[in-house]
Amino acid sequence: MTYALIGDELRLDGAYAVCRKIAKREAKNFYYAFVALPKPRRNAICAIYAFMRQADDLADDESLPVEERRRRLDAWLANWRGVCHGGDSSDSVFLAVRDAVERFGIPLNLLDELVAGVTMDLDRPASEDQAASDAPDTYATFADLYRYCYLVASVVGLVCIRIFGYQDQRAEKLAEKTGIAFQLTNILRDVSEDAERNRVYLPIEDLAAHNVSLDSLLHRKPGSLPTAEERALLASLAARAEEFYKSAQQLLPLIDRESRPALWVLVAIYRGLLKRIEKAGYDVFSRRASMPMPQKLGILAVGMARMAVARLWI
């Protein structure tokens, strides 16, 4: 092996190390699933997460005007596309993602969709009756929300199963639906925080069906408990999430054996979070729902044991 090749490998190892550090610091739930993967797959997943984190941070930097955020995102995308076409870069995340794309055959259009998802809020024009600059970001119907969830979560799932490995094409639709389940769980958990950022992801049609006003979500007394109507609204979204989690169970046997423990960990953590929200009576206002660290570590321990067993079959 030449010194140039050794240098490239060391540089790539360093790039993946940067991505692992970002994932460990930022991916509060995902990281526990990453640990249950063999190293090459774990590296690739961490790289994809770091890529998504970069785009999300640029899109959500509220210290900057929207137009400046768009400009920076455009420049970031131009740099990424240059790297895709063989250009060099000092960005460790780009170097790692390019290697992951080549190693696992990840279609570049999926990464384009991923970026479209995290930048979706920047590109949504205000409607005629929401012309004011302070109008909240909302979704009229569940179909509209599904499209958002697809871009920010299902696309991640479609990328992940390329890294996990699969043969049966049914895995793609099941991965899409599993992503919807995860994002609906996130939306339920973050209702209060999103409202503080002038965002309501619960569909307006659902609010109307449960006699909940948009204003009651956006301007509520700090720490106030949900009303009966709000509990029913949140329960209806939780029921939808539970239906989508059924796809996760069907997906598990379709991916490569050594990757199944990681997906199992991820599903167990996210579905466990949904169960905690349900058991709390959908009180997502007075406190933020989360899974205790000991419970996460317990799930990870089971996942690691499953990984050890899976390797015996390889």
Image: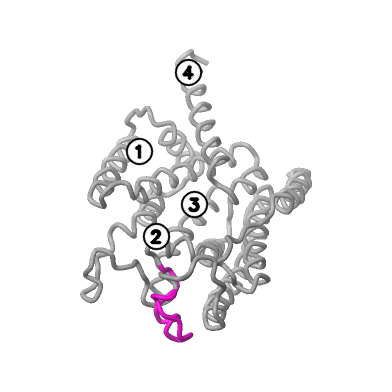
Nearer the N terminus, badge 4 or badge 3? 4
How far from the left and from the top, in percent, is residue 173?
51, 66
Check disc 3 and give the amino acid type: Val
Q: Is residue 268 magenta?
A: no
Quadrant location of the C terminus?
Answer: top right
Q: Secondary structure at mark 2?
A: loop
Q: Which quadrant of the figure has residue 236?
A: bottom right
* Magenta part of the chain: 200-216
Q: Which residue carries the number 4 mark?
A: 7
The label number, if any, that marks residue 159 in the structure image: 3
Q: Which mark is residue 84?
A: 1
Q: Nearer the viewer, residue 240 or 95?
A: 240
Is 310 above or below relative to 180? above
Badge 1 local density, few (<14 within 10 Å), some, or many (20+)?
some
Secondary structure category for the residue under label 1: helix
- Residue 177 shows in the view: no
Disc 2, disc 4: CB below 8 Å?
Answer: no
Q: Earlier in the sequence, mark 1 or mark 4?
A: 4
Answer few, some or many: residues within 10 Å of disc 4's Cα (few below 14, many 20 plus, some between 14 and 19): few
Residue 234 lies, with reference to residue 159, above or below; the image says: below
